[in-house]
Amino acid sequence: MSIEVRNLNFSYGYRQVLHDISFTANSGEFLSILGPNGVGKSTLFRCVLGLLSGYTGTVSVDGTDVRSFSVREMAKHIAYIPQSSHPIFNYSVSDIVLMGRTSGLSTFRSPKKQDVEICQWAMEKVGISHLALRCFHRLSGGEQQLVLIARALVQKAPVLMLDEPTANLDFGNQLRVLEQARSLAREGYTVIQTTHHPEQSYLFSDRILTIQDGRVLKEGTPEEVLTEETIRALYGVEVEVVSLYHDKARICIPAHITA
């Protein structure tokens, strides 16, 4: 399932945050939206998800404008994975994941055996079935993020949107979460993440869309986008982009260190 954004503009009062944003993400693709903090990445997500409605332009899923979707219909097409979740009550992991089935339940209907089985499938898929009875608040940041991915999977939505999924995670948990997201893209999901990490974008993405001051700066393959010129424009720093392992990975080193 494809998601298409065309000529999207959005303002908070008199302050325009997004300027003529356009891109397409297709089934089986991992798209990273890369840029520094405060450039409009999260606002873009909120517009796509229908949480902000005062935009101009179009957001469509397989050709259907998302403005025509109800909240329940939106949940059947797009699943959102936030940076973190802090439920008031200390639910178990299985309960948190089961909450993702609410889009498929009619009002006042209790989860059935099939719903529970789907939750078990999702937890096994992301490797957290052994945590099913653990309290969500007592998990590590990486484990919590995998729980949120499992909760999104049980929606059975073909589009997954992850808002800075590795924020506040250590290196190991960053890799686990991104490897899981890339694996889901290989299975046919449309995966879109926001991030401010160039190296992670290069390693895990099929395409990168860079945003600066609410505008698309550059879009293309990781090799095309992750250049010294792009990093300078995005972050205002001089770096040398170094290729490792036959160009399978790139790292950005401050220019004064390599001088």
Image (spheres, helix red, strand yellow):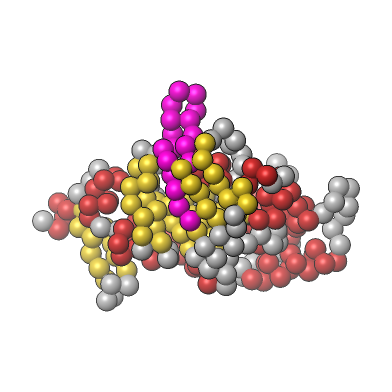
Q: At 42% across and 65% down in the image, what residue appears?
A: 206
Q: Which percent across, then down, holds residue 7? A: 46, 43
Query: In the picture provided, is 138 more to the left or to the right than 226?
Result: right
Which quadrant would the N terminus be assigned to in this image?
A: bottom right
Q: At 54% across and 44% down in the image, what residue appears?
A: 58
Q: Quadrant of residue 53?
A: top right
Query: In the picture provided, is 200 more to the left or to the right than 258?
Result: right
Residue 235 higher or lower than 257, as above or below: above
Q: Which percent across, then down, holds residue 154? A: 70, 61
Q: At 48% across and 63% down in the image, what residue appears?
A: 30
Q: Nearer the viewer, residue 202 or 11?
A: 11
Asked whether residue 22 is drawn in magenta, I would say yes
Specify start and end residues of the magenta stretch as a single range. 8-24
Report the number of numbered marks.
0
Q: Quadrant of residue 88?
A: top right
Judged from this view, the residue extending furthest toward the bottom is 246
Judged from this view, the residue extending furthest toward the top is 14
Residue 144 higher or lower than 39, as above or below: below
Q: Which percent across, then down, holds residue 156? A: 69, 62
Camera sees residue 41: no
Camera sees residue 1: yes
Asked whether residue 112 is drawn in magenta, I would say no
Classified by dominant secondary structure, the portion drawn in magenta counts as strand
Q: Nearer the viewer, residue 63 or 238?
A: 63
